[in-house]
Image (tube, grey):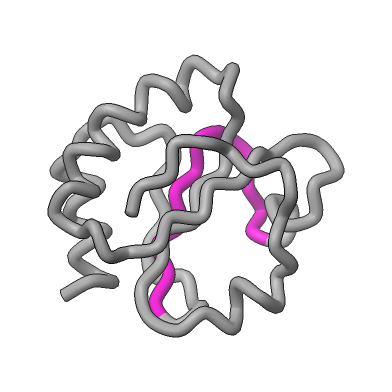
Amino acid sequence: MMNDTYSVAQPRRAEIDALAGPALLEFGTGWCGHCRATQAPLAAAFAQHPGVPHIRVEDGPGRALGRSFRVKLWPTLIFLKDGQEVARLVRPLDSSEIERSFALIDA
């Protein structure tokens, strides 16, 4: 289910690595214009994959989880399968591009 709030509390990297099945890890902030622009195409693609967990993490300087994934720009979408990164999109605006990445983790 798509999450609409960036969580300030961050899971540990070990928790992410231990996930079973597909998951979407999204890094960004609520005030970021690029992050807001991505939400409509992300919602359109997410509609086809409502069972995929959506972990939405507020990122910023010194935030350990974002640094462990080497996030540099927002939003960064990381598509995971069994805790492993399968695809990454940075500032996507095309729902079909997002859908292709979802298809890699949620067949």
Locate residue 77, reporting x and y percent. Answer: 44, 49
**Left or right side of 41 for 2:** right
Reply yes or no: does residue 35 show up in magenta: no
Reply yes or no: does residue 79 show up in magenta: yes
Which residue is rendered at x = 18% and y = 38% of the image?
44
Which residue is rendered at x = 72% and y = 41% of the image?
8
Which residue is rendered at x = 58% and y = 38% of the image?
6
Locate residue 85, reporting x and y percent. Answer: 47, 70
Q: In the image, which residues are magenta?
A: 69-81
The furthest residue to the right: 62
Which residue is rendered at x = 56% and y = 20% of the image?
32
Vertical placement of 22 versus 10: above or below?
Answer: below
**Left or right side of 62 for 99:** left
Q: Nearer the viewer, residue 20 or 87?
A: 20
**Quadrant in which residue 90 is drawn:** top left
Quadrant in which the C terminus is drawn = bottom left
Quadrant in which the N terminus is drawn = bottom left
Vertical placement of 85 versus 93: above or below?
Answer: below
Q: Nearer the viewer, residue 87 or 56?
A: 56
Locate residue 58, reporting x and y percent. Answer: 65, 39
**Left or right side of 87 for 29:** right
Q: Nearer the viewer, residue 95 or 54?
A: 54
Locate residue 22, reporting x and y percent. Answer: 36, 73
Label tally: 0
